[in-house]
Image (spheres, rainbow, N blue to C red):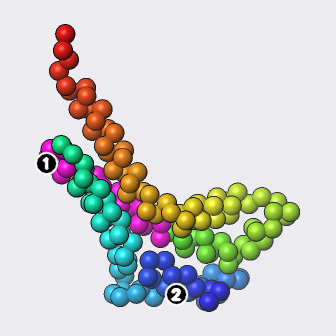
Amino acid sequence: MWNQVTPHGQTLEFTSVAPTLRWHWTPADVAGSLAPALLTWNTVLYLTVWSFVPSLPRSDRLRWLCVATPTLALWHVADLLLTVESRLLTLTRPEGYDLSAGFDLWFLWVKFANNLNVLGLRQVVPLLLIAAQWLHWRRVRNEDAPTAV
């Protein structure tokens, strides 16, 4: 439907756009919950790569998980909000697609970010997170290593 967006298994239906915006939120399973499919996928992807990092002490693995858990949850919420904002802009400001009328930078940024996200950024974020953690861990480990004189 033209007025419906279904981010992560939820349904957000815009019932009226003008003169005021009205919408109706229908959760997929339980009222008030976010669908865990993408969050679960990202968590499994993170844990799979995390389990293959060699020679990582158990305490560091626990620290990595403590950082990754809220980061992946926030990424899930940000992705959800970006999807809804993109659809909302399509409904409320369709003239944003017409560049001859002028540039709507917010419209263009949201559409670009959402398309990039849909094309693969969703799956890259857990990998970027593990890469950042590994690079930081490697740098700290090298600083703590005794130097031979």
Image x and y of residue 79, in percent: 48, 66
Helix, strand or loop at disc 1? helix
Image x and y of residue 59, in percent: 14, 46
The three-letter amino acid code for the residue at tag 2 is: His
Q: Is residue 110 left or right of residue 147?
A: right
Residue at 19% across / 25% down in the picture? 145
Quote the CA–CA distance across marks 2 and 1. 46 Å
> Which residue of the protein is positioned furthest toward the top in this rendering?
149
Tell me if I can see residue 78 in this picture: no
Q: Quadrant of residue 56?
A: top left
Residue at 24% across / 53% down in the picture? 52
Residue range of the region highlighted in magenta in the rendering: 56-80
Q: Quadrant of the C terminus?
A: top left
> Which residue of the protein is positioned furthest toward the left in this rendering?
58
- Mark 2 Cα shell of 10 Å, populated few (<14), some (14-19), many (≥20): few
Residue at 28% across / 36% down in the picture? 138
The three-letter amino acid code for the residue at tag 1 is: Arg
> Which residue of the protein is positioned furthest toward the right in this rendering?
100
- Residue 58's disc is 1
Tell me if I can see residue 41 in this picture: yes
Q: Quadrant of residue 74?
A: bottom left
